[in-house]
Image (cartoon, helix red, strand yellow):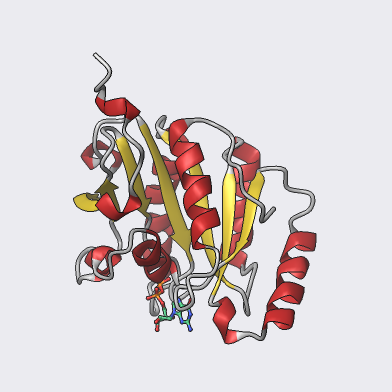
Amino acid sequence: MSDQPSAKAISFNSARFLVSASRLEECPPDQGAEVAFAGRSNAGKSSAINTITANGKLARTSKTPGRTRLINFFSLNRPDCRLVDLPGYGYAKVSRDMKDDWQQHLDHYLSQRQSLRGLVLVMDIRHPMTDFDQMMVEWCQHNNLPLMILATKSDKLKFGQAKTALLKISAMLKHYDCVEHLVMFSATTKAGLDDSRAALEAWLEGREAEILST
Ligand code: GDP
């Protein structure tokens, strides 16, 4: 039979909210492939997910009260392929205990999830490599998890400034071979959309991405 579901091309527009999880046990079965998005709060993670999935409301789910600290899963048209929205870090003035709790929760997910193929770290191109970003990059490096950096809100800078900012980020990351892609991105102009989709698709399909941005 040629009509196997796994042969279907991935369409990011097909993304639908699947489930929220507060603990590893509540996550969907750990099979197939998924890519997770992380970012400091306000970096532009939700906007990036909405842009990639062409669904202006999708990641809003993750922002509804009660869900901001959960891991939110989105299904795609190909069975067992998922996008994952990790809780934003640094929301409001959470207590130290809550931060520890958040970190433990995330640690469990990142360290134990077999289907995790890569991490997308969203950072504001004007304020890159915060402590949180540094922590995530170190984590990926240590655990051999492929990383894509989306340097977003690039429309806030003139093109030349954005290019310079990207070069600076690239220099900061040169010793980290976990970084497979560094993409200048904008939810407003859709810059970097094709490249980021190509990289995600390749990760989910388990092959090399053919993109120009790194
Ligand atoms: P999150 O907390 O990381 O999910 O951040 P959001 O996606 O909610 O974005 C935070 C703010 O930045 C919102 O006001 C967005 O409209 C704005 N924003 C996000 N991405 C972009 C972008 O690419 N360009 C511009 N100009 N604004 C953006």
Residue at the spot x=46%, y=58% of the render? 38
Residue at the spot x=26%, y=69% of the render? 60
Q: Nearer the viewer, residue 50 or 142?
A: 50
Residue at the spot x=24%, y=22% of the render? 3
Q: Is residue 58 left or right of residue 192?
A: left
Residue 58 appears anywhere in the view:
yes
Q: Is residue 212 left or right of residue 74?
A: right
The image quarter in which residue 46 lies = bottom left
Q: Is residue 173 above or below residue 177?
A: below
Residue at the spot x=57%, y=52% of the render? 148
x%, y% of residue 201?
Answer: 45, 42
Residue 97 appears anywhere in the view:
no
Residue situated furthest front in the rendering: 2
Q: Nearer the viewer, residue 131 or 137?
A: 137
x%, y% of residue 172?
Answer: 76, 61
Q: Nearer the viewer, residue 198 or 101?
A: 198
x%, y% of residue 71?
Answer: 31, 53
The image quarter in which residue 173 lies = bottom right
Q: Quadrant of ligand 1?
A: bottom left
The image quarter in which residue 169 lies = bottom right
x%, y% of residue 100?
Answer: 43, 58
> Which quadrant is the N terminus positioned in?
top left
